[in-house]
Image: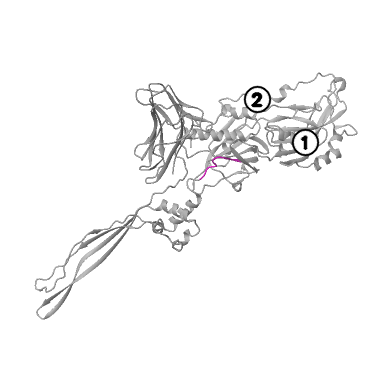
Amino acid sequence: MRSVHAFTALAMTSCAAALPQSIPLGEVAEIPAAPITETPLGEGAGTKVVPYSPDAVVADTFASVLADPASADKSLKRRGWDCSEQPLGKGPVPSPDSPEAFLVMEEISKAATDASTPTGYVNKFKNLKGSNNAVAYLGYKTLDTYDTQACADSCTEKEGCSAFNIFYERDPSVVPADSCSNPASTTVIKCVLWGSPVTAETAVNSGQWRADFHVVIAGSNGYDSERVVSVDGYSGESLGNVAINAPNDCNGDDTYMGYKLFNDGQPFEPARCAAACEAETKWNVEHLNSRMLCKFFNTYVLMKNGEPQGQYCSMYTQKWAKSVAVNDGQYRGDDHYTIASSYSYSNTADPGKPKLPCDVAAAKSAIIASSLQPFCSTFLGYMTQVSTVIATVTATVPATTVVITDAPVTTTTTTVTQAPQKREVAVQDTPAALADFAPSAVSAACSLQATPVTETTTTSATTTATVSSGTVLVTTTLPVRTTIVTSVVAAAPTCTARGVNLVNNPGFEYGMAAWTQSQYGANGPIAWGVGPGGPSGGSSYSVTGGNSGTGTLLNQKIYGLTRGVTYTFSYKYFATASPAGSISCYMIGTGLSSQSGTERTNSWISGPTYYGGTFVAQSTFGELECLFNSRGAMTWRIDDFFLGC
């Protein structure tokens, strides 16, 4: 996989971790924390809305420069210092009317302590005397009562909101000025919305002075959302305060692809990680690294000593269960890095999978560990190919011996070759090491291990000759031949990646990534390339030719074929007219040769229509080449290639 570079101009950081999945604290510690915003205090009752467009943030994630976001507070203009009235709150006012009495008011403390936790949220702190200074401020509203559910509803309705802070605020009833430097107070019940987690460590805004009036906070409660934000094309799951720490998959392969960290102060947005995941896939497809395709990501807010540092995205090639979410943070010296608001998302259409099914990989390991290849040869159901060689060795008979009877000695060479024949395998034939596996898994694993086996057996045979000298009968035994039997078991070719499409970018979702195009013959196209309009929307490759005809080649290198395995080749195509012409696709040296014609027009058709829908691979790789040819004005379109077993 390519290394992931840092985009400092974007106020985000991304690179491959030195140790897979562990938070690279040597890098993270050098990254500035996400910008902190203070909640505006002392302005009385009212509502402040901070605009947020998640689509725009996602679209800008990989731009060369992120626009510097305008501070939400720039639009808040102070009134004149003229003792003008401020909007009054609905909360209780202590007697005497002093900040000290406000801070110990039992009615306030009880309301905060007894407050219920809304469904879909988790309480982070209760009854503190400070509001949050946090990341991604999204505005506030004032309430008539200390109503956590009403505040939660506001957060749920606000795009980008992932936490809220509700508290009582002692505000001046008029704008303090020289002639009213310490006016009577009003108590505002404030609901503040945030696009990042809130913690007790960030609830440090204890108030401010307005002339001689002391604005203070009491009854401050914080809540984080646990709801899973929907992301198009992905299914999500809440992980709480832990992150994925995936082991190697059942094939022993590492599925971790690296991370990205966004610390630009934008609200926590899972769709940003989806965009990063898809961009990583696009890069790998374009660079023929198709095995590292991002299908799953874990996103969370990285916290340092309780303060948010940014949105972290870990990417993987396949989905992992919640059970492997065991990373609850790390220490770097005295600094404690923890996880907050952690979610995992898997690609709905294709959550990824190991290169071999797990049961096949486990059976393969058992075969190797128990030296069960001879069993595999039998299990695959093929008779042994036998080659028998017979050599003759003759002893010398003494000259004084009269041979009365000499058995004939002959030399023969016999070779017997049997074609593979299927046979039934009894269940009891299965070794104990493979007894718990399904026959299909054993068969697939045996196919992977059925490399040629040579067994050699040497036997000796003798013949006896009886000789007579005078009246004494002498029997002499002569060794006359040695038989060597060699057995060779040939591996039966099998599909080890059933259903896997060996064509990269088969639907042209990433433009011409992995494909090349060129003119064929004297008559080139009027227009060619990827454009809108596929069989199910999206994009397709199209070629438009004039009256003089069209000659265009579309090429892609294909890897991963297995000799002797039967493959299926297909695509969908569209012709706007029906002059003589065809789409002919080949892979020279592999066995693929197919063709489609123009008999039907203006509708998508499954091809090839003439021949070449299946072929037996004759090599392990080749170059797919499709020739678009016509003798008149028309447009070819082609989409949804598939080549697999």
Disc 2 marks which amino acid? Pro
Q: Is residue 628 left or right of residue 142?
A: left
Q: What residue is shown with label 1? A: 150
Horizontal and vertical percent position of residue 88? 85, 27
The local secondary structure at tag 1 comes to helix
Q: Residue at x 59, y 28 (%)?
A: 59
Q: Nearer the viewer, residue 537 or 346?
A: 537
Q: Which residues are magenta?
A: 344-353
- Residue 461 found in image quarter: bottom left
Q: What residue is shown with label 2? A: 69
Residue 273 shows in the view:
yes
Q: Is residue 539 above or below residue 251?
A: above
Q: Residue at x 42, y 36 (%)?
A: 609
- Residue 27 found in image quarter: top right
Judged by its main secondary structure, the magenta piece is: loop
Q: Nearer the viewer, residue 547 or 600?
A: 600
Q: Residue at x 9, y 73 (%)?
A: 400
Q: Nearer the viewer, residue 218 or 457?
A: 457
